[in-house]
Image (cartoon, grey):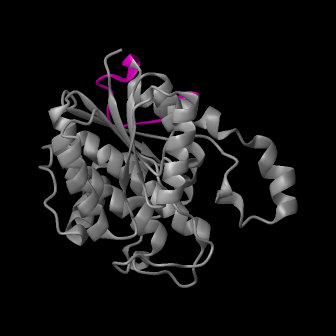
Amino acid sequence: MAHKTVLITGGNSGIGFETARQLTARGAAVILACRDETKAQAALASIKNDMPSAEVSLVSLDLGSLDHVRQCAEVVRDRFPRIDVLINNAGVVPTRQQFTQDGFEMQFGVNYLAHVLFTQLLLPSLEAAAPARVVNLSSVAHWLGHINPKTWRGRFPYLVMDAYGQSKLANLMFSNELGRRINPHKVTSNALHPGGVDTGIFRHVPKPLFNTLIKPTLISPKKAAELPVALALDEQYAGVTARYFDHAGPARSRPVARRPVATARLYERSCELLHIDPLPAPEDTG
């Protein structure tokens, strides 16, 4: 396998960290884009301790600030003019309603909107490495989501899983729309459900319910990381775009996530919020 450069958001813990470890073990040069510098340095040190020859770099990325996303993208384009794979992994699930620096509900702003901006700004580096790949972490929880613009700057009452479901549905819709608008010979875009993973995402669930119903079905971050690593590097996914996968293979998704009119509407409205130009639409959006 040729040497690949892979950038992963939120690669300092959980699925992201295990994904970074497995990527480096397969010979990829990994860029960890993280908000918490202390945790990022610890992640880098852990990987280097196990694999001294691993190529691991850090960039500072706070997805809660669109200005910081723009600054990070500029740094990345300067330091890494060619990126083979972008893995949009980072996410938050606050149990109380919180807001980004730009006034968006935190899950919509961090999990979805900031990743749209980051991806769009890094397209020059991805296209320079063509054929390149974008891998988006969605979730089976997208089935719970509804795209509701009235909630993007706050929802009352705040229902954590409704907010999470909307952000994951938006991730999947963006992934599909990006795949429709970019030449797959240059950049592909696919989304995935990593599996139910034993991470902090379930901390708001009552402990008896978690222990009896949820915990037995969960998999480890190490197991969950296998799918994003495969989508990033495996030859079987070359040229595959606008698809959604779980560990069993191609996965079912909500029909709205595959509906070009709906995905185009969300993408174009998101670009308006971000003050960026959308990619040209394909001719079949009708």
Residue 244 part of the magenta-drawn span = yes
Determine which quarter of the picture holds residue 237: top left
- Describe residue 206's horizontal placement relative to residue 228 as left or right: right
Name the quadrant of the N terminus: top left
Residue 43 picture location, percent across and down: 54, 45
Picture residue at 55% right of the left edge, 49% below the top: 42
Task: Give the answer, above or below, for where 159 lies relative to 185.
Answer: below
Q: Position of residue 182 (x, y in %)?
A: 19, 39
Residue 245 in the image: state x and y as whole percent: 49, 34
Q: Is residue 274 above or below residue 136?
A: below
Identity of the residue drawn at 45% across and 78% down: 99
Taking the image as shown, residue 198 lies to the left or right of residue 2, namely right
> In the current view of this chain or complex, which residue is farthest to the bottom?
156
Q: Is residue 96 left or right of residue 86?
A: right
59 drawn magenta: no
Looking at the rendering, the stretch of residues picked out in magenta corresponds to: 235-250
